Image (spheres, coloured by chain):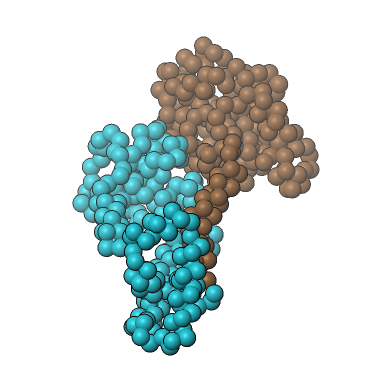
């Protein structure tokens, strides 16, 4: 389990830190401030090229992408906010233009389903492990030793085990005899809650 | 009991897989390109652009035709425009008004193109910066818009215009728009 968690952490880390975007030609825009440049970079990373579909503006050289970058730059020079520029783009190219679609009822599934699924899975996993731990605790309690069985129970148990051994094919029997003597076999069975259940029901 | 539950858990990947197969199967053969049609059902964006043949004169939105017509976005640098050009000439012959928007082009190349291949346009304007095209929600050239008599955009064709999509999509739309009193639903029906 620890290994699994480590792998997951590693994946998460690589997704965050290794930039997956490709960059188009070197841009020659001049900005009045670092803040404006950061605004520009943020927006062209966020906007999708309407022509090339799966590239953002930053990664595309299509004529339309160049125009949209120019427009973004011009609007930033005019001192427009991110929200205003986003609205300008969205009026012309719809929700498709942004890799960050707005949150509204029609996009709720998109935004909230993945975290919900994660919570459900983690919750389910947590619940299962809790329950299993609880079960195995009770099993350990009742199986402290064979001495607690009454003579009658012991006889039933021996008979059951004998019939089980007898029902095996000769080859299987031979194999199991070589591996584990009968007594050890019963001991391991008792540690396992599933076969304990089965034994009780049959 | 536990064992059965365990079996169920192991079945989950298979169920998810089958679900995926079903989902993907129904997407087979469907276009994967997303087309944005934000210009539809809206008036032609206001513009003031230089006339291609005489850039000292400008054309305004109010000077556009008052009956149904096409707006065709083109450039001499655009290979598909060259492909569709003969068909645009053919449409002119059939009496269809086309307004040409020369998109992000050199004026000399554009004029040579029209002089050499023929001019299918009722009116040609120059959109050198691509600003008007942006307002139309253009993704590239060529693109063609069907506009009704009130100046509202009714149809958006991305890519080449040819006999096939003219017959299938554009001609029915133009026909309804040309009728004197078509109601809204029949326009929408014909211009999808």
Question: For the point 58% across and 43% down, which residue is it?
Answer: B25
Left or right, A198 with reference to A30: right
Quick one: quadrant of the C terminus of chain B? top right
**Residue A127 appearing in the image:** no
Quarter assignment of residue B35: top right
Q: Position of residue B42 (x, y in %)?
A: 59, 46
Q: Position of residue A56 (x, y in %)?
A: 37, 43
Q: Which chain is cyan?
A: A
Task: Say if B42 sits above or below A137 in the image.
Answer: above
Q: Which chain is brown?
A: B
**Residue A52 appearing in the image:** yes
Number of numbered discs present?
Answer: 0
Return the residue nearer the eye: A43 or B56. A43
Left or right, B96 with reference to A134: right
Return the residue nearer the eye: A115 or B1. B1
Task: Say if B108 sits above or below A60 in the image.
Answer: above
Return the residue nearer the eye: B163 or B23. B23
Q: Position of residue A153 (x, y in %)?
A: 46, 84
Question: For the point 71% across and 36% down, which residue is it?
Answer: B173
Question: For the point 26% across and 51% down, which residue is it?
Answer: A14
Task: Say if A22 sits above or below B91 in the image.
Answer: below
């Amino acid at each position: 389990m620890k290994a699994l968690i480590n792998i997951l952490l590693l994946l998460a880390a690589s997704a965050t830190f290794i930039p997956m975007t490709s960059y188009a030609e070197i841009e020659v825009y001049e900005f009045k401030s670092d803040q404006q440049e950061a605004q520009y970079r943020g927006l062209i990373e966020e906007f999708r090229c309407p022509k090339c579909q799966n590239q953002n503006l930053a990664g595309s050289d299509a004529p339309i992408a160049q125009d949209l970058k120019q427009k973004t730059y011009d609007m930033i020079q005019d001192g427009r906010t991110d929200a205003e520029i986003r609205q300008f783009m969205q009026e012309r190219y719809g929700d498709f233009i942004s890799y960050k679609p707005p949150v509204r009822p029609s996009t709720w599934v998109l935004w909230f389903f993945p975290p919900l699924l994660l919570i459900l899975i983690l919750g389910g996993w947590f619940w299962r492990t809790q329950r299993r731990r609880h079960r195995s605790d009770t099993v350990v309690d009742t199986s402290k030793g064979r001495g607690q069985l009454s003579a009658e129970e012991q006889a039933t148990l021996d008979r059951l085990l004998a019939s089980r051994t007898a029902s095996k094919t000769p080859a299987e029997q031979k194999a199991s005899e070589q591996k584990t003597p009968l007594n050890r076999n019963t001991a391991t069975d008792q540690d396992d809650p599933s076969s304990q259940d089965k034994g009780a029901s049959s | 009991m536990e064992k059965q539950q365990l079996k169920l858990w192991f079945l989950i990947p298979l169920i998810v897989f089958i679900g995926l197969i079903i989902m993907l199967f129904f997407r087979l053969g469907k276009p994967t390109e997303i087309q944005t049609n934000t210009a539809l059902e809206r008036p032609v964006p206001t513009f003031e652009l230089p006339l291609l043949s005489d850039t000292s004169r400008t054309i305004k939105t109010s000077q556009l035709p008052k009956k149904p017509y096409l707006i065709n976005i083109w450039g001499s640098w655009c290979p598909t425009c060259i492909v569709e050009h003969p068909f645009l000439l053919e449409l002119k012959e059939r009496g269809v008004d086309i307004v040409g928007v020369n998109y992000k082009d050199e004026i000399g190349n554009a004029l040579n193109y029209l002089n050499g291949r023929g001019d299918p346009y009722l009116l040609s304007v120059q959109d050198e910066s691509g600003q008007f095209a942006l307002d139309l929600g253009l993704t590239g050239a060529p693109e063609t818009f069907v506009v009704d008599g009130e100046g509202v955009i009714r149809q958006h064709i991305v890519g080449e215009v040819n006999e096939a999509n003219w017959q299938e999509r554009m001609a029915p739309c133009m026909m309804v728009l040309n009728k004197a009193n078509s109601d809204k639903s029949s326009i929408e029906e014909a211009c999808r």
